[in-house]
Image: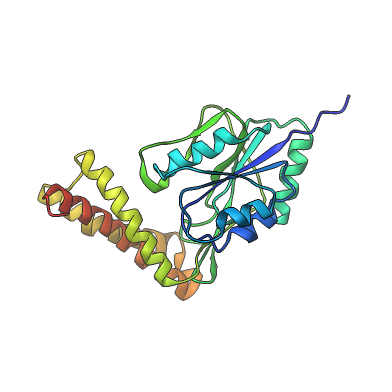
Amino acid sequence: MPPQRKTLSIAMIAMNEEANLPRTLESVKWADEIVVVDSGSRDQTIEIAKSFGAKTSYHAFGGHGEQKNIALDLCSSDWILLLDADEVPTPELQKEIRDLLAGEPKFDAYWIPRLNRYFGKWIRHGGFYPDRKLRLFKRGTARLSEGVGPHSTPQFAGPRGELRGDMLHYAYPTMGIYLEHMNRYSSEIARLLDQRGENSRGLLPFLWNTVLNPTATFVYNYFFRLGFLDGREGLILHINHSVYIHWKYIKAWRLGQGKE
């Protein structure tokens, strides 16, 4: 007998205004199930999701990984594709996933290359591509890390496969949105660093974390990993990524001083 096709759920969370949501939902409307967990969006997120036939649920925001785990628990298909509201699988990736689930997948989880768009440009160098993410996995085999801030990732024990099609990440169309996110994310990470006692109390840790580490990161990514090939947008990205590193350690140091 031919293998039975595996069903697929799309798991997503929405936190604020999700202008990209219709584009993302349109790209996955072929899936067997779409689950959108909302934590208080101020636009028409729920209405938009329902218009695509999505299953929706509201949960107060308790953390990035925590929120995504709620979405995973609401999925009922054999497999899950975990997406953010600003991520879109290319037609090539969509076909690759459908073909994979039509047969017998060799692995229970798969890495997907992510192509990031910053300030209107696709970034292909400087360590930002291929930005592989573990996003496709058999239901019940992976969970998101909790209590680790905005950079929570699925945890899966076992061998993983790699898909070739890209997941497009429409990250930061404007500088204002980028700076707002980096300010918020650096504050979240700083609180975690302070809780772990990594608040640069000594002079040498302070200089390394707030000055040398950001500088070394810029030099490594922009020059050695060819970030300069992405033009002015690449330069802006790598400068501000290093500033983000500076921010999170400065904020952790301030918290350790009791000044934040």
Task: Between residue 144 and residue 213, name the one nearer to us.
Answer: 144
**Above or below, 166 relative to 122:** above
Residue 101 x, y percent position in the rendering:
74, 36
Residue 120 x, y percent position in the rendering:
53, 72
Residue 255 x, y percent position in the rendering:
17, 50
Instruction: Answer with the quarter of the image where residue 27 lies.
Output: bottom right
**Above or below, 83 relative to 70:** below
Q: Seen from this angle, which residue lies furthest bottom?
A: 232
Position of the N terminus, as image quadrant, is top right
**Above or below, 231 relative to 185:** below
Q: Is residue 89 visible to the viewer in this orientation of the structure? A: no
Tell me the residue at 59%/58% (across/down).
21
Q: Seen from this angle, which residue lies furthest right?
A: 1
Tell me the residue at 22%/59% (across/down).
211
Give the left or right position of residue 195, taking residue 51 as reference. Answer: left
Task: Between residue 132 and residue 25, name the one nearer to us.
Answer: 25
**How is the rendered protein coloured?**
rainbow
Q: Is residue 169 visible to the viewer in this orientation of the structure? A: yes
Give the left or right position of residue 7, taking residue 190 as reference. Answer: right
**Above or below, 118 relative to 103:** below
Tell me the residue at 19%/40% (across/down).
197
Task: Between residue 225 and residue 63, name the one nearer to us.
Answer: 63
Instruction: Answer with the quarter of the image where residue 260 lies.
Output: bottom left
Residue 150 x, y percent position in the rendering:
40, 48
Tell me the residue at 47%/59% (across/down).
42
Give the left or right position of residue 67, taking residue 53 as reference. Answer: left
How many numbered badges does the structure rendering display?
Answer: 0
Task: Between residue 162 and residue 69, name the one nearer to us.
Answer: 69
